[in-house]
Amino acid sequence: WYEWRRRKVTQAQPNGAHHAIAQLANYVPKLTVITQNVDDLHERAGSTAVTHLHGSVHSPRCIDCGAAYEALLPSEPLPEAGIRIEPPRCTRCNGHVRPGVVWFGEMLPDDAWANALNAAKDCDMFISIGTSGIVYPAAELPFAALANRATVLHINPARFAISSQELFLEGTAALSMKSLVERAFL
């Protein structure tokens, strides 16, 4: 299942928002990309130094010792529904290998969270794209930016409640980000 899912992710293509964010780096002296997504679409669109709050489907690791799994994952066809397959084993401790993502109830990776929080506290503009802003701890980031007098802009297709200090742009990430970059810099 894991390899099938990973292959599906690798077949996905970056959308207009991913490309606009990568393009934005050409005009903004210091751009930090923080994502809750576990894919590599930001990187494939051209963004560098992306902070993955929820890990990456491309970084499997051992459940027991946490070691990165460097071997190729099995790629045989999936068995018929209802048949369980054994996950790969860690070459270091023989524990089971799991996707390198954060599951519900798990803590965010310390380095990723620290990087995201520091970036939010140090920014002059924080753009929150395509999230409801209600899942913590990531929902804390706009507040950290506001506390340091940054402008906070939320882009989402569905309007949600914000404070009087925040801005809201209702629309899809792809169209809104493309329009925002074009209007501001082109």
Image (cartoon, helix red, strand yellow):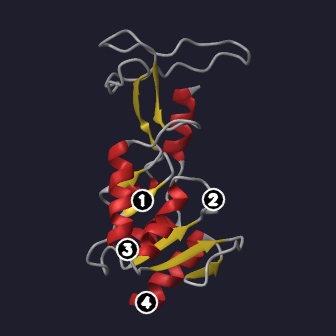
Give whichever of discs 3 and 2 has the lower sequence position.
3
Q: What residue type is labelled 4?
A: Ala
The label nearer to you, 1 versus 2, is 2
Is disc 3 placed on a helix, strand or loop?
helix
**To which residue does mark 4 refer?**
184
**What's the residue at 43%, 74% (across, down)?**
147
Mark 2 or mark 4: which comes first in sequence? 2
Choose the circle earlier in sequence order: 4 or 3: 3
Front-most of residues 70 and 136: 136
Q: Residue 68: x percent and y percent?
A: 33, 27
Tag 1: amino acid? Ile
How far apart marks 4 and 3 lie (CA) works out to: 12 Å
Q: Which amino acid does label 3 sit on?
A: Gln
Residue 50 horizontal/vertical position (percent): 35, 56
Q: Mark 3 points at which residue?
A: 23
| 90 is higher (above) or lower (below) than 152 | above
Horizontal arrangement in the rendering, residue 79 relative to residue 143 (left or right): right
Q: Which mark is residue 34?
A: 1
Q: Is residue 46 left or right of residue 75?
A: left
| Residue lying at the far left of the rendered structure | 29
Q: In front: mark 1 or mark 3?
A: 1
Q: Nearer the viewer, residue 13 or 40?
A: 40
